[in-house]
Amino acid sequence: MTSLYVKHHKALTSIPRGLFSRKWKTAIERTFLHEGDIDAVIFLNVPLNLLSDLPSYIKQRFHVPSIYFDVDLPISLPSYGGFHLSHYLGANLSQFDGFLTTSEGVRSELTSMGVKNIAEVHWGIDHRLYSPIDVSKNTDVFFYGSTSRFRSEWFDKMVCRPALELPNRVIAISGRASNQYAHVKMLGFLSFDLWKRQICATNICLNISRDPHANAGGTSTMRLFELASMGACMVSNPHNGLQNWFEPKKEVYILQERDRPSEIYEWLLGNPQLMKEMGVRARARVLRDHTCDHRAKDIVRFVSKLS
């Protein structure tokens, strides 16, 4: 399906682009009429190649800037094919006045596609919603994620092999994984409340970044900030730029290529006070630097430069 879309995206998007463009213009008109004082329009991860000339229309009709915010970079780029389909194909990126991303490493590729005024706004957390819950520990190692795509190597290193090497430890995963793994407890898809309880009921929570996110440079992923805000003891695969948000060995343990994850898990599990302190420090870092209020201020500063 992806290769078919790459070859025929112009024909495949022409009809929905026309339909959506008219509907969005009507909605924009109605919103401006109702709200009145609007300083900017931010498009958050809507399909770029279905927007037609909407950003240019907003500029001409209402004299305010249009900004696109993509939180799926770099995977959403044509070079990776997107999660399913890349909505960059056939899109006019130059009509946006600004572009926000959670990835510093994609600047050159975005610029080559006509993007201007790029800025990074990394993930932030509502620390009131993501706060520690006082529950008993019943799991040693826990990972949650939708699929193993782009992270199968580190998923094997950090989950599958340790489950075989540490049969007396409880290693669990949640999400929509369809495969079964030996000695791994499959929790299925958890509701938000159960998911938060599971994090707090776990000694070590894993961050396994997808390869493009880990390698692009300065690409933040939501999981890190969620776990930190929940006060989890985090262990992550190598992730370029992670040290910019959390301090290695104090707020997060970052594995190296030569490390054997099962040995790191056993070392941490044998030091419960250290695990607790890492979680406390990680949450304190979120409160200091990574709340949604911090990110809102970043966005306001960016918009003010464009207005």
Image (cartoon, helix red, strand yellow):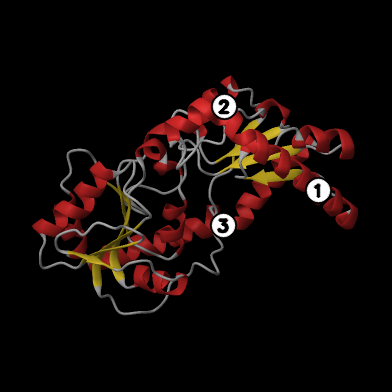
- Which residue position holds label 3? 291
On the image, the x and y values in percent for residue 67 come to: 70, 39
The quadrant holding residue 140 is: bottom left
Image quadrant in which the N terminus is located: top left
- Asked whether, in this view, residue 183 is left or right of residue 78, the answer is left
* Mark sitting earlier along the chain (3/1): 1
On the image, the x and y values in percent for residue 98 come to: 69, 34
Secondary structure category for the residue under label 3: loop
- Which residue position holds label 2? 110
- The amino acid type found where label 3 is placed reads Thr
Q: Is the Cβ of the residue at disc 2 closer than 8 Å to that at disc 1?
A: no
Residue 217 seen from this side: no
- Mark closer to the observer (3, 1): 1
* Mark sitting earlier along the chain (2/3): 2
Please give the name of the residue rendered at 40% of the width and 43% of the height, measured from the top-left corner: 242
- Which residue position holds label 1? 28
Q: Is the Cβ of the residue at disc 3 closer than 8 Å to that at disc 1?
A: no
Nearer-the-camera pick, 100 or 9: 9
On the image, the x and y values in percent for residue 37 come to: 88, 51
Within 10 Å of disc 3 (Cα), the crowding (few <14, some 14-19, many 20+) is some
Residue 237 seen from this side: yes
- Mark closer to the observer (2, 3): 2
- Mark closer to the observer (2, 1): 1
Inter-mark Cα distance, 2 to 1: 26 Å
Inter-mark Cα distance, 3 to 1: 30 Å
